[in-house]
Image (cartoon, helix red, strand yellow):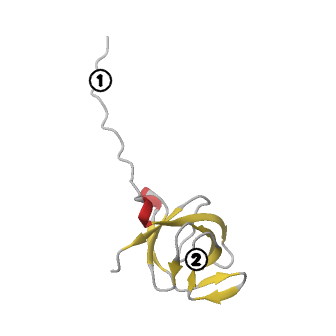
Amino acid sequence: MRVTAARPKKSKTVVREEDLIGKVLRYDAAHGVAIVTLSAPANVGDHVRIGVGKKSFVQFIESLAVNQLAVECAGSGRIAAMRVDHPVEVGATIVREPPL
């Protein structure tokens, strides 16, 4: 009989409901734009974390567009385009971060 040490459980990142802004629906690599569905309002100038775990990064929202028109803010329930600095995966979460 072989005895092995118990492996530590992987910690899961817990996202608070009030910090969740939305999820990525699509990513356009040619333009560096993520198409997102918003579950909370998002504003130009917000700091957000995109992704989960080690594949996440903090992003400053520089531009938002709704129906191909540039906007300063996009409300909950809208589908918006957001320019991103790094490639993102479909389904990645977008979480509001405190300002740096």
Q: Amino acid at mark 2?
A: Gly
The answer to the question of whether label 2 and label 1 lie on touching residues, with beta carbons closer than 8 A, is no
Based on the displayed image, in which of its 4 quarters is residue 79 positioned?
bottom right
The number of discs equals: 2
Q: Which mark is residue 92?
A: none
68 up-or-down from 95: above or below:
below
> Furthest-right residue in view?
67
**Label 2 vs label 1, nearer the camera:** 2
Q: Position of residue 75 (x, y in %)?
A: 58, 76
Q: Position of residue 91 (x, y in %)?
A: 59, 58
Q: Residue at x 72, y 81 (%)?
A: 67
Q: Which residue is mark 1?
A: 4
90 up-or-down from 67: above or below:
above
Q: CA distance from mark 2 to mark 1?
A: 52 Å
Based on the displayed image, in which of its 4 quarters is residue 77 positioned?
bottom right
Earlier-in-chain disc, 2 versus 1: 1
Secondary element at image label 2? loop
Crowd around label 2: few <14 · some 14–19 · many ≥20 (10 Å): some
60 up-or-down from 29: above or below:
below
Q: Position of residue 78 (x, y in %)?
A: 64, 72
Q: Which mark is residue 75?
A: 2
Q: Position of residue 74 (x, y in %)?
A: 58, 80
Q: Residue at x 52, y 70 (%)?
A: 40
Judge left or right: residue 33 versus residue 15.
right
Crowd around label 1: few <14 · some 14–19 · many ≥20 (10 Å): few
Q: Residue at x 64, y 83 (%)?
A: 65
Q: Quadrant of the C terminus?
A: bottom left
Q: Amino acid at mark 1?
A: Thr
Q: Residue at x 52, y 77 (%)?
A: 42
Secondary element at image label 1? loop
